[in-house]
Image (spheres, helix red, strand yellow):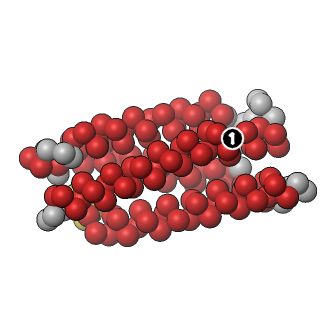
Amino acid sequence: MVSFKELNEQNHMIAERAKIITYMIQDRTICDTDVTCDLFFDLLERVKSHMDIEERELYRNLLTHPDQSVKNTAENFLSGSAEIKRVFKQYTKRWCHNRKLRIKDHDRFVKETNEIFDMIQDRIISETEKFYPVVRSVYGEQMAA
């Protein structure tokens, strides 16, 4: 079971890694080095794991909650998770192969990576400001999902 503290720590680690990778990929010569690739794929795994935990352990009670606004919030965030996963799948199909980055168009890669990371940052902010308060109202402050 996961706590709010753990969820927030996961989000912090995701945001931190995204900022570091964003900085690293600006330099084409280190863009697809082993270190950058390791950080990049670690970030992708952290994002996937975080969303899987939320889906597995938070949404179930929220989607069946008697308060329609709680249900709507859960449905919106679940839908957002599905969209993020869809975008990630397209992105990794284009830029990744066997846990390595394959970058043929550096400018395009940087642009798309920044867009993905902006999407992640927006999601983290939304979780903190909108989703977690609703979760707290259902599970309580000392929630262990």
Specify whether 101 is left or right of 91. Answer: left
Coordinates of residue 83 in the picture (x, y in percent) = 53, 65
Between 111 and 35, which is closer to the camera in this rendering? 111
Coordinates of residue 41 in the picture (x, y in percent) = 33, 50
Specify whether 78 is left or right of 47. Answer: right
**In the picture, residue 59 is in which quadrant?**
bottom right
Between 98 and 33, which is closer to the camera in this rendering? 33
Which residue is located at x 24 percent, y 54 percent?
Answer: 110
* Quarter the N terminus occupies: top right
* Quarter the C terminus occupies: top right
Coordinates of residue 35 in the picture (x, y in percent) = 21, 41
Say whether residue 33 is visible. no
Coordinates of residue 123 in the picture (x, y in percent) = 54, 49
In this view, 112 is above or below 27? below
Which residue is located at x 69 percent, y 50 percent?
Answer: 57
Tell which residue pokes out farthest to the left in this image.
Answer: 29
**In the picture, residue 71 is in which quadrant?**
bottom right
Which residue is located at x 63 percent, y 50 percent?
Answer: 54
